[in-house]
Amino acid sequence: MAKKNEKITLDPEAFAAAVLGGNEQRPDEANKLYIKRQLTLYLEATLLAQDFNEMEESQFDMAKSQQREAVLSKIIEHRYH
């Protein structure tokens, strides 16, 4: 766990790979659709991690709890959808 004055940063590629690891192909899903879904999920996860890092860099410690919750909610939302 990070201390109050330590920044938290995510490796966007590692984060996206971890997200993809839990996203299995559906039994009735065509390969092409699955690959498109995986690519979309990878790109979204990478961008979200980058957004998180930018927010952390600029003023994560000073952000309102609502802003933090919004970023974390987006990360969770994209993880499970």
Image: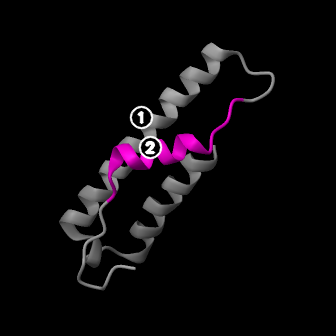
Task: Residue at 24%, 78% (x, y): give it.
Answer: 6
The secondary structure type at the circle numbered 2 is: helix
Q: Is residue 31 magenta?
A: no
In front here: 81 or 23? 23
Q: Quadrant of residue 23?
A: top right
In front here: 49 or 70? 49
x, y percent for residue 60:
28, 71
x, y percent for residue 40:
49, 30
Of all residues shown, which one is farthest toward the bottom?
Answer: 4
| Mark 2 / mark 1, whichever is N-terminal | 2
The secondary structure type at the circle numbered 1 is: helix
Task: Residue at 53%, 60% (x, y): give it.
Answer: 73
Q: Is residue 16 magenta?
A: yes
- Circles 2 and 1, Cβ within 8 Å, touching? The answer is yes
Q: Which residue is mark 2?
A: 16
The amino acid type found where label 2 is placed reads Ala
Task: Residue at 32%, 52% (x, y): give it.
Answer: 11
In the displayed structure image, the side of residue 52 where residue 15 appears, left or right: right
Q: Which residue is mark 1?
A: 43
Region rendered in magenta: 10-25
The amino acid type found where label 1 is placed reads Leu
Q: Which mark is residue 31?
A: none
x, y percent for residue 22:
62, 45
